Image (tube, rainbow, N blue to C red):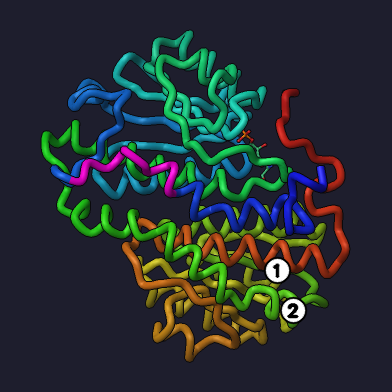
Amino acid sequence: EQAGKGEYDHFMLKEITEQPTALAQAIEGRIDPTSGRIGLSAFEPGSFEAIDSVQFVACGTSYHAALYGSLALNQAGVQATALLANEYSVAAPPVDETTLVIAVTQSGETADTLNALRQATAEGARTLTVTNVVGSTAAREADDALFIRAGPEIGVAATKTFSSQAVILTLLGHRIATDLRGEPSADLESLLPALESMPSRIHELLEHSDAEAIAEQYRDSRSYFFIGRGLGYPVALEGALKFKEITYEHAEGFAAGELKHGPLALVTPETPVFAIFTGQEDEKTLKNAEEARTRGAPVIAVCPDGHPAVEAADEHLSIPETDSDLAGLFANVQLQLLSYYAADLLDRPIDKPRNLAKSVTVE
Ligand code: AGP
């Protein structure tokens, strides 16, 4: 096992640093440089024309990627919802042959997600699995499968697979939107070059991150809060899940605008607030962060250098200026590093947190 970790103390850090390669593999051959279109070879142009709506089903980190994908689809004008797979049997909206149900699962073996997929199939929906594992049960059982090609992930905490899922769902979302509209959306012009430069920019972020120093600075906090808006919201949820999963400290993620509807009562000088800025209504998120700061909470802005939030916050985790479809994924890498270093300071068993399994094959 030690050999597999190479120079790293933990698989988690190894897998975080593998993200440039994982993302390059995820997009390889999927962007057609001549037409500037998205080429997902499993799907001929027009293959999604008969789809009216999309439902994503997933659990945990994969649910956060699914939420990211569903918001991106909504923003492209397609009706889409992300549902927790373990709630699907009691809370599924109706489906028919015009519904595309997309199971998002790194392992392809999560029992809750398989159950939701089987229910959707039985009720007549079209199904698709987005997974990392070729030959997995979910890949075999769905009508179609799309592989994220992240390479093996050993650490229980999902890291590189989240980034690869979110990127593949962004590409897929644009393909679906293109089929439904009959032409690619204008935003593809900025998205595709931003995607192509993502691996090298993540590499740069990893080289210059201040996450370790910030983990050290706030190590004695009582709770850790993460806020974001739009595509920053699933990233806030994911930041908190990763933090609690491997540090065993209390962490919560909120939609930035929700803070004032209850969670603000928890905010004190001992609860750092990590505010994620993705370029979607950032001025509102800044206002929400300032509301927390006024109550004494230290605010750590996760945003590009030179962003107004840098001045307004106590600390800064830097992300590059990029397309707003992708900014949250850079922020997420900073938050992965933060969780990793916070857990390492506490000497937690990072790759195998207590009570958790890599693949949850029970209901
Ligand atoms: C995340 O760090 C966890 N390991 C967990 O939430 C995981 O994402 C969830 O159990 C779903 O797993 P899957 O992607 O293999 O379906």
Residue 218 is marked as 2
Q: Is residue 209 magenta?
A: no
**SS under mark 1:** strand
* Furthest residue in direction bottom, as rendered: 311
The amino acid pointed to by label 1 is Tyr
The amino acid pointed to by label 2 is Tyr
Q: Who's the residue at 54% across and 60% down the image?
A: 332
Q: Which region shows up in magenta?
A: 24-33
Q: Report the image quarter containing ligand 1.
A: top right
Residue 54 coordinates in the image, percent (x, y)? 36, 30
Q: Residues within 10 Å of mark 2 (few under 14, many from 20)?
A: some
**SS under mark 2:** loop
Residue of label 1: 224
- Is residue 49 toward the left or the right of residue 285 in the image? left
Q: Name the image quarter holding the C terminus.
A: top right
Question: Is 260 located above or below residue 153 in the figure?
Answer: below
Could you tell me how far apart the alpha carbons at marks 2 and 1 are, in whole angstroms? 9 Å
Residue 177 coordinates in the image, percent (x, y)? 23, 38
| In front: label 2 or label 1 | 2
